[in-house]
Image (tube, grey):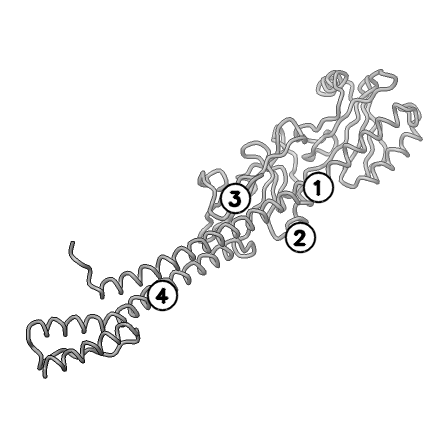
Amino acid sequence: MRPLPFTQLAVTGLGAFVAVAIGVTLYFSAATGVRSTQELIAEQAESHLDALESRIAAQLAPVSAQAAAISAALGEGRIDLERTAELDAFMLGTLAATPQVAGIGIVDAAGRVRRWSRDEGAKREDWSKRAEVREWLAAGAKQSDATWRAPFWTPASRVPALLHDLPLRREARFVGMLGQVVTLSRLSETLAQFRTEHGVTPFILYGEDAVLAHPRLAPRASGAGASPLTSIAELGDPVLARLREAPGFEPLTLRTLKRAAGGHVQIGSDPYLYVLRQIDGYGPQPWTIGVYFDPVAGGQRAQMLGVFASAGAGLAVLLAAALSAALIGRRLARPVEALARAAHAVRAGELEHLPQVPPSAIAEVEEARRAFEQMVVGLRE
């Protein structure tokens, strides 16, 4: 086996040792930094979704609670469909307590309706000849719990809305249906306020391509046979328009999401991160709530770029340290290399023209150099 030159061993060995030591440290440091930043960004994204879900619940949960209170008051006899003056006072009071509710109506088993709104007060109508009302009453007679219905056009004002209904019974006898209307424009106003407070754009999707609520969604005019919901294409939001075209993988910044799905879309030179979550309990099919982050205001890109910049700086330090270690190894090996050349010259009998052996900072090498020079002096004599 051929022995290794000391110079090569000193240069490559010391350089490699320093590179490995620093590299391992930098790797774990960078991996920890990336992971921590990922978790921070994912936690921020999910916290926005949590806040949005809570805001939606704060808007709609009181509607369910109010329906239960009205049903209890009717069942206990505190209000009666025939005592209209007392009924009107009670219902207008409950309407005042829930500003998110645009109107309340009670349709009795015969199809006669009494409804209350802020603009018109109490109003009585006969809907008994409407086929959809008769079907609604027939289904309600078999219904036991409160239900959120699919988005619909309100019969009177023809605006897109959600209907929360509950069958009313007195002494186990079905007496009618209670309906409360929450307009979709009210939900969009809530989302616009959420955007101002949190600096992200929230939205609620219904199905594959319909928008239930969005900060820029204006009240929609009625149309013959038209859906009460605005399509993604009609909304004009470029991020939502590209949402279904987004790659089927989560970006690096969102790979630690636990209770949501994430992705990104590219609008020009700007990447937009988004997170989505499905929620149940507000209709026949789940809603998809989501937020997307402005590429500048969101800060997620800057956070990850900061981590990568730190990793790049660490790599530069690694290269500098490895190069410095190689140079130091080279410097330490020079006296040994010179001593080997001088010994080779002595073996060849060239005592008068020996290579100069420089002093060394290593004690053992320096001692060997002095002993070698004394030996050369003796050989010359």
Give the residue at mark 4.
Answer: 321
Q: Is mark 4 on a helix, strand or loop?
A: helix
- Residue 256 has which mark? 3
* Coordinates of residue 161 in the picture (x, y in percent): 69, 34
Q: What element carries label 3?
A: loop
Instruction: Kindly report the distance in space between the C-alpha atoms of the residues bearing marks 3 and 4.
Output: 34 Å
Identify the residue shown where x is 18% and y is 76%. Answer: 372
Q: In which quarter of the image is residue 156?
A: top right
Q: Give the mark nearer the N terminus: 2 vs 4.
A: 2
Identify the residue shown where x is 45% and y is 60%. Answer: 310
Q: In this view, does 84 lie to the left or right of 139?
A: right
Q: In this view, does 27 lie to the left or right of 294?
A: left
* Coordinates of residue 205 in the picture (x, y in percent): 59, 37
Q: What element carries label 1?
A: helix
Say what amino acid the circle numbered 2 marks.
Glu
Q: Give the mark nearer the N terminus: 1 vs 3.
A: 1
Instruction: Kindly report the distance in space between the C-alpha atoms of the residues bearing marks 2 and 4.
Output: 48 Å
Please tell me which residue lies in front, 343 or 170: 343
**Rendered-image quadrant of the C terminus:** bottom left
Say what amino acid the circle numbered 1 marks.
Arg
* Viewer-nearest of discs 1 and 2: 2
Identify the residue shown where x is 56% and y is 51%. Answer: 40
Instruction: Kindly report the distance in space between the C-alpha atoms of the residues bearing marks 1 and 2.
Output: 17 Å
* Viewer-nearest of discs 4 and 1: 4
Instruction: Kindly report the distance in space between the C-alpha atoms of the residues bearing marks 1 and 3.
Output: 34 Å
Say what amino acid the circle numbered 4 marks.
Ala
| Disc 2 packing (10 Å; few <14; some 14–19; many ≥20) | few
Q: Is mark 2 on a helix, strand or loop?
A: helix
Tell me whether circle 2 and circle 4 mark residues in contact (CB < 8 Å). Answer: no
Give the residue at mark 1.
Answer: 186
